[in-house]
Amino acid sequence: MYGKFKEHLTNELQEIKDAGLYKSERVIVTPQSSEIEVENTNGEVLNFCANNYLGLADSPRLVEAAKKAMDNRGYGMSSVRFICGTQDLHKELEKAISDYFKTEDTILYAACFDANGGLFEPLLTEEDAIISDSLNHASIIDGVRLCKAKRFRYKNADMEDLERCLKESQDCRFRIIATDGVFSMDGNVAPMDKICELAEKYDALVMVDESHSAGVVGKTGHGVAEQFDAYGKIDIFTGTLGKAFGGAMGGFTTGRKEIIDMLRQRSRPYLFSNSVAPSIVGASIEMFKMLKENDDLHDKLVENVNYFRDKMLEAGFDIKPTQSAICAVMLYDAKLSQDFAAEMQKEGIFVTGFYYPVVPKGQARIRVQLSAAHNREQLDRAIAAFVKVGKKLGVLK
Ligand SMILES: *Cc1c(COP(=O)(O)O)cnc(C)c1O
């Protein structure tokens, strides 16, 4: 049988390649950091495409905490949480996350993909509705698909369109508005103040995925609730430990007590998937301790974002008005975005070019992700490379 299937796959793979959409992987041979070594390139390259917003992916303090947790609590749990997979560490981390987001309770998952995948189905039925931003992350989209609730979709961060959905869904029993905190392609922040106002007016719940916003937005980086003073108005937060919060892996849902309690009873990725490993849990507890001590990493990140954005605007680049650590350098043309990224790689700078269908047609760009780990010299090197390549490819005069 495989012969026919093999032929089918080979053809499909070739189509992906012909469309220029085939994804190959760069192989890093060092820890994840602002400067990395990659197989088949000469020397070190500067990394501007990791979600390592607070620069903690190679933090010696977190590595140490992970080792200590392994020494004291072992390597793996070999169990789901409710059978025999809960250690004191898991409880401690859930408490730390609740403290950070000022919520009532938290439930851990193996990934935020699982948190979103297992969120809606246990809470809502066909009597209810989910009203979702059109640019929400794939895991929210999958979570919505797994749930029987009616689906409504509004244009990205468009409050008139959200209001239309709220009016159209008025007959449903319960409604949840679901949004990313920061959208990964433009780096824009969801207008949580207006979303919460509309939720109040139309009697809907609010869910926000803080994966790209926690640790990044808000005066001290505590996410969208801090930025919009929306504490008590957002019912559910989901998030990842795989981006700003250390970058290893793990996800969570945090929010109202009864919601979290119901997820512990019914959420399938929680009930039927393994507990997060002690090393990651221990290091994550240490990470939240670090963030409590001072705001230095967040301050540094904001300083880097502002510096990079200002210098790039000065140089004449067209930059989306970023509100996060994501900076979209607009090139509009798909092929140009790929050529630009390739030239940048030759200059020793890792950035990613995105084009349709990842972003709308005619909206191709280079996405730059800043980190607290970047130093001034590294930022200057990246900006100089942008200018050099920009001139070479005719983007800058
Ligand atoms: C990265 C991301 C996720 C997935 O997080 P994992 O913990 O890696 O599964 C979910 N939602 C959003 C918005 C993300 O950006």
Image (tube, helix red, strand yellow):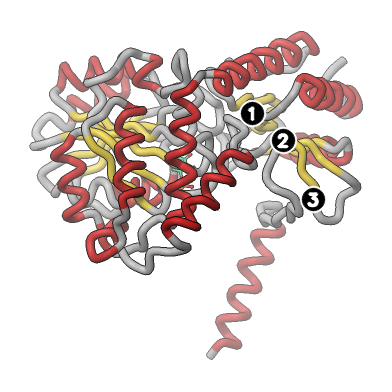
Q: Give the percent coordinates (x, y) of residue 364.
A: 66, 33
Q: Which residue is drawn at 84% across and 42% down?
A: 44
As helix, strand or loop, the secondary structure at mark 2 comes to loop
* Cα gap from disc 1 to disc 3, whole angstroms: 19 Å
Residue 316 appears in the picture as rendered = yes
Q: Which mark is residue 38?
A: 3
**Quadrant hosting residue 172:** top left
Residue at the limit of the structure toward the bottom, as seen here: 1
Whether 150 is drawn above or below 212: the answer is: below
**Residue type (three-letter) at the residue carrying disc 3:** Val
**Residue type (three-letter) at the residue carrying disc 2:** Ser
Earlier in the chain: of badge 2 and badge 1, it is 2
Whether 167 is drawn above or below 7: the answer is: above
**In the depicted view, which residue is nearer to us: 346 or 115?**
115
Residue tagged 1? 371
Q: Which mark is residue 34?
A: 2
Instruction: Name the side, left or right, on which 180 lies relative to 306.
Output: left
Instruction: Name the side, left or right, on which 387 lies relative to 157.
Output: right
Q: Which residue is drawn at 81% across and 40% down?
A: 45
* Disc 3 and disc 2 in contact, CB within 8 angstroms: no
Q: Which residue is drawn at 34% across and 31% down?
A: 208
Earlier in the chain: of badge 1 and badge 3, it is 3
* Disc 2 and disc 1 in contact, CB within 8 angstroms: yes
Instruction: Name the side, left or right, on which 82 lies relative to 113.
Output: left
Whether 275 is drawn above or below 189: the answer is: below
As helix, strand or loop, the secondary structure at mark 1 comes to loop
State the count of labels. Answer: 3
As helix, strand or loop, the secondary structure at mark 3 comes to loop
* Cα gap from disc 2 to disc 1, whole angstroms: 8 Å
* Disc 1 and disc 3 in contact, CB within 8 angstroms: no
